[in-house]
């Protein structure tokens, strides 16, 4: 895509380094003074809050013990904090322009340049010297934080180099030396880094084939911007950008044709969201000549954000996604404007109003997000007068992603009241995979009824061979049955078959065979699941499981996960879930509950202090049975 269109003439398309100005440099005081006064005050206060911060060095003991949570977490927090404090002071100094923040900026630059390791401890396996845990300075690697650090240091250089040179010319030289040797050199020279997507590699820690995921656009964007801001060797500048195009072409080719982000909305910001930043970089550095914003696939990748939206800040959250996401960032606005997508823009503007901009500025540590808001605040506000932001045309009645086998449906177009249903097929080797083929989500009037718990706080275990020992990864804690003691198995071969999207006037949903998602020792002969939103005289949802066993069993139980404290009327075969009633066959199934106390912050933010696992177990042996679960509205 990019390579084919632009690589051959790249030397005529790119601006030289001295002509590339994504933001005004420090000396352009007129531009910095033009930022609205209330925003300038916030940005200066953010810098003032960290003026006395003592930058912390990274200790060898923390790297050697990074596998222990107390060390690994502390290492990451210190490294991230050092960089964020530096960038807070950089922005504050550019806004105020009095030199007050410069000493802290110099301290931050030196501490980052002196850090031996800009990477995650978990990325040590990417070194050729692995399992050694200390940095191999002869074999620098590029991961998410090292790419980001290179970009932010390059941006610091671009904004303040003339001020640095007044103090000491070695400041700028040191930044260029570290960025070029740690990140740009391996970017230019290596093609075996897994996220570059040229060679598919096995992750030795998890023993899985690396998926092509958010790492690719995220790292490419940050590396590319560092090249554009720092690289003054014309040949390296050209070849580096062409290589970035080759990598991004692989990512776009690998990405689902239908635009579905199988990593969820919270990862969309690091995936297509990072891609739009990268494409904007190329557009800007070529004076608009490099432009693929009109490509249909690029457009559809942006639309996932509103197609995954449920209501009241909830999104469908399969795999490692979070159900609640309140940070509609500049990336959605930028994506909508660049691709000229009116529906996406209306969705973004619903959340991205003046108040949310100001809140974002008070808490955000992403310097690119900060600068985008600061210099585009008034332009964004103008869009409220140019577009019908009252329209809710982003609330689709139904949608289906055939590549990822994910469907959504609601009662009415442009209306988030009533029932919302989502269901997925797919396989159990997806990016950030959970064993969850056939799982479904139900909301009623924007309130969660049956949910996917999502993912807890990340730890070393999350990305190790012990991943599926974590309860949130197991099908036992998704809305799926345990059959003869077997939960679903992990791997690409454990997948839904004969998946079909049902889209009729009276019903919308998904049907599939789940037999092959379980180990053959479970003795399942056939298992068909059908999940439907019925749109008849009244709206209701049904889940129908037709299961045939090779031999009789009474060892079968169905799981339903809910944040609601359920009430049971077993005589009627009903469970009351606040505004919804779950009806079941009480002749066949008995009910029990498991209370799950949530200790991890990422889960608490979505569901509160606890979840309930509803377990419906067989009362008698069956060999061939159809189970129907019906969800109706409570009076």
Image (cartoon, helix red, strand yellow):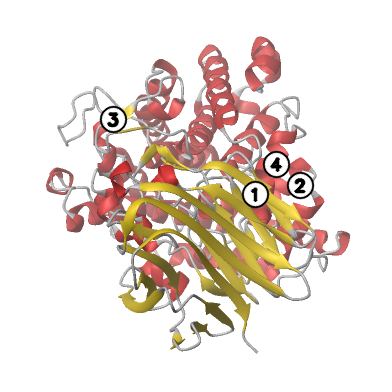
- For discs 4 and 2, the disc positioned in front in the rendered view: 4
Do the numbered discs 3 and 1 sit on residues whose CB atoms are within 8 Å?
no
Q: Position of residue 111 (x, y in %)?
A: 29, 45
Distance from Cα at disc 3 to Cα at disc 1:
31 Å
Q: Is residue 138 left or right of residue 369?
A: left
Q: Can you see residue 432?
A: no
Do the numbered discs 1 and 4 sit on residues whose CB atoms are within 8 Å?
yes
- For discs 3 and 4, the disc positioned in front in the rendered view: 4
Which label was assigned to residue 304? Answer: 1
Q: Position of residue 433 (x, y in %)?
A: 41, 46
Residue 367 higher or lower than 351, as above or below: above
Estimate how packed mark 2 is, as few (under 14), some (14 to 19) or many (20 or more) residues with alpha carbons within 10 Å.
some
What secondary structure is found at the residue carrying circle 1? helix
Residue position for label 3: 126
Question: Residue at coordinates 67% horizontally, 45% vertically from top-left?
Answer: 302
Residue 225 placement: quadrant: top right
Estimate how packed mark 1 is, as few (under 14), some (14 to 19) or many (20 or more) residues with alpha carbons within 10 Å.
many
């Amino acid at each position: 895509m990019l390579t084919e269109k632009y690589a051959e003439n790249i030397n005529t398309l790119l601006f030289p380094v001295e002509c590339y100005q994504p933001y005004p440099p420090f000396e352009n005081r007129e531009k910095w003074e033009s930022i609205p006064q209330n925003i300038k005050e916030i940005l200066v206060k953010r810098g003032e809050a960290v003026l006395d911060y003592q930058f912390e060095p990274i200790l060898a003991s923390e790297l050697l013990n990074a596998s222990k949570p107390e060390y690994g977490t502390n290492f990451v927090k210190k490294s991230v904090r050092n960089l964020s404090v530096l960038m807070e002071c950089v922005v504050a100094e550019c806004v105020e322009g009095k030199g007050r923040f410069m000493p802290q900026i110099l301290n931050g630059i030196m501490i980052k340049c002196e850090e031996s390791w800009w990477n995650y401890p978990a990325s040590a396996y990417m070194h050729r010297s692995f399992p050694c845990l200390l940095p191999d300075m002869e074999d620098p690697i590029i991961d998410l934080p090292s790419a980001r650090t290179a970009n932010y240091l390059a941006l610091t250089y671009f904004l303040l180099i003339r001020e640095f040179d007044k103090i000491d010319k070695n400041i700028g030289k040191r930044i260029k030396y570290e960025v070029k040797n740690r990140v740009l050199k391996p970017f230019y020279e290596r093609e075996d880094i897994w996220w570059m997507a040229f060679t598919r590699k096995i992750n030795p820690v998890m023993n899985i084939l690396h998926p092509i995921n958010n790492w690719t656009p995220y790292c490419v964007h940050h590396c590319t911007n560092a090249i554009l801001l720092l690289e003054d060797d014309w040949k390296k500048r050209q070849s580096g950008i062409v290589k970035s195009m080759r990598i991004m072409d692989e990512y776009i080719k690998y990405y689902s044709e239908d635009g579905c982000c199988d990593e969820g909305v919270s990862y969309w910001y690091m995936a297509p969201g990072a891609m739009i930043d990268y494409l904007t970089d190329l557009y800007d550095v070529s004076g608009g000549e490099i432009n693929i914003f009109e490509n249909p696939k690029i457009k559809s990748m942006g639309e996932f954000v509103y197609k995954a939206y449920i209501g009241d800040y909830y999104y469908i959250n399969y795999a490692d996604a979070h159900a609640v996401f309140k940070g509609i960032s500049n990336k959605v606005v930028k994506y909508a404007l660049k691709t000229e997508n009116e529906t996406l823009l209306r969705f973004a503007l619903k959340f991205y109003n003046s108040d949310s901009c100001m809140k974002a500025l008070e808490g955000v540590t992403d310097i690119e997000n900060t600068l985008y808001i600061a210099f585009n605040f008034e332009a964004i506000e103008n869009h409220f007068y140019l577009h019908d932001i009252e329209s809710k045309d982003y609330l689709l009645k139904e949608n289906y992603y055939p590549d990822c086998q994910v469907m959504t449906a609601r009662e009415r177009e442009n209306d988030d009241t009533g029932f919302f249903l989502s269901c997925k097929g797919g396989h159990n080797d997806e990016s950030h995979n959970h064993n969850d083929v056939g799982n479904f989500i139900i909301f009623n009037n924007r309130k969660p009824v049956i949910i996917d718990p999502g993912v807890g706080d990340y730890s070393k275990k999350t990305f190790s061979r012990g991943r599926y020992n974590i309860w949130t990864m197991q099908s036992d804690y998704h809305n799926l049955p345990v059959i003869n003691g077997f939960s679903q198995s992990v791997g690409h071969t454990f997948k839904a078959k004969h998946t079909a999207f049902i889209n009729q006037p009276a019903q919308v949903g998904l049907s599939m065979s789940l037999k092959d998602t379980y180990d053959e020792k479970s003795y399942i002969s056939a298992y068909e699941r059908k999940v439907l939103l019925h749109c008849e005289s009244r709206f209701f949802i049904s889940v129908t499981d037709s299961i045939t066993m090779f031999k009789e069993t009474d060892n079968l139980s169905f799981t339903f996960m809910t944040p609601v404290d359920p009430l049971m009327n077993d005589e009627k075969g009903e469970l009351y879930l606040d505004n919804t009633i779950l009806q079941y066959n009480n002749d066949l199934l008995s009910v029990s509950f498991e209370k799950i106390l949530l200790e991890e912050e990422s889960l608490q933010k979505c569901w509160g202090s606890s979840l309930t696992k509803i377990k419906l177990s067989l009362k008698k042996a069956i060999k061939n049975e159809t189970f129907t679960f019906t969800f109706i509205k409570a009076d």
